[in-house]
Amino acid sequence: MKETLTARVGAPGGFGTTERRDPWWLESVLVVVALLAFIAYSTWAAFWGSDAYAYGPYLSPFFSPYFRPAWWPPGWTTALFVLWIPLGFRASCYYYRRAYYRAFFGSPSACAVSEPQRSYTGETGLIARWLPIMHRWFLYLSLIVLVWLWIDAIKAFDFDGHVGVGVGTIVMLVNVALLSFFTLGCHALRSAVGGNQRCFSCAHGGGNTRYHAWRFVTRFTENHKLWAWLSLFSVGLTDLYIRLCAMGIIHDIRFF
């Protein structure tokens, strides 16, 4: 007879009370470590590591699009005015909200595991109710930033007026591809292109086009979690690679 696992919100046993014997806490620990590591590194890169953001035709994604008027105070960089867009996009993302709700707030901790709260309220707070709306606006802004990142990836083939390919070129190209997969897999984008439609063939004006756009976006949405993590790691690693090259710690290999 199959055993039933039980746990109650705010159970007498306290947070983490469960009959589960598997390492249910492991995913939350990994999420906490990964997110804190990325936040720490990106904050350092944006505020204190801004003197090594470019190398040859390579530009760190943290500083794209790059602009710095002469009248700006020393230490001010593009990152201070651009990073809030991808940060807001990820912080309001449906998957990331699930991940950090569980990892940082234990809401819910895991299936059949007691929570620290006495009752489950879900996303009933004022900010939480506005997050889906904010996410859609961050999506539109992120699409603009993504275009600039593709421009930077194309410029990474230009070595003093000659077309070339280096390790950094490939790194930047892979990074922007992963960011594109993550953005295209956004649930808000899927809703925007195909939402509120019960019958695409019955829709007036572009129903067939919306259907194909919805199918295209759905292919990325199905692996949204994978693209979310791969793109997060790729952004940090791309900045790190360019930074190490700019500091002379490693040398970029040119293929041609």
Image (cartoon, rainbow, N blue to C red):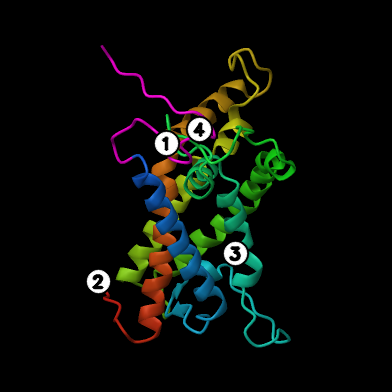
| Residue 123 placement: quadrant | top right
Q: Residue at x 59, y 73 (%)?
A: 66
Between circles 4 and 2, the one closer to the viewer is: 4
Identify which residue, 18 or 182, lies in the foreground: 18
- Pointer 1 or 3: first along the chain: 1
- Residue 83: give its label: 3
Task: List x then y, in percent, for residue 198.
Answer: 61, 15
Identify which residue, 148 or 86, lies in the foreground: 86
What are the residue bounds of the magenta stretch? 1-23
| Residue 241 placement: quadrant | bottom left
User: Counting other residues with Cα less than 10 Å from the Cα at mark 3, is it few (<14), some (14-19), or many (20 or more)?
Assistant: some
User: Counting other residues with Cα less than 10 Å from the Cα at mark 1, is it few (<14), some (14-19), or many (20 or more)?
Assistant: some
Question: In this picture, is 138 found above or below 212?
Answer: below
Disc 2 target residue: 255
Residue 125 shows in the view: yes
- Pointer 4 or 3: first along the chain: 4
- Pointer 4 or 2: first along the chain: 4
Disc 1 target residue: 17
Main SS category, magenta section: loop
> Which element carries disc 3, helix, strand or loop?
loop
Amino acid type at mark 3: Leu
Q: Are marks 4 and 1 in contact (CB under 8 Å)?
A: yes
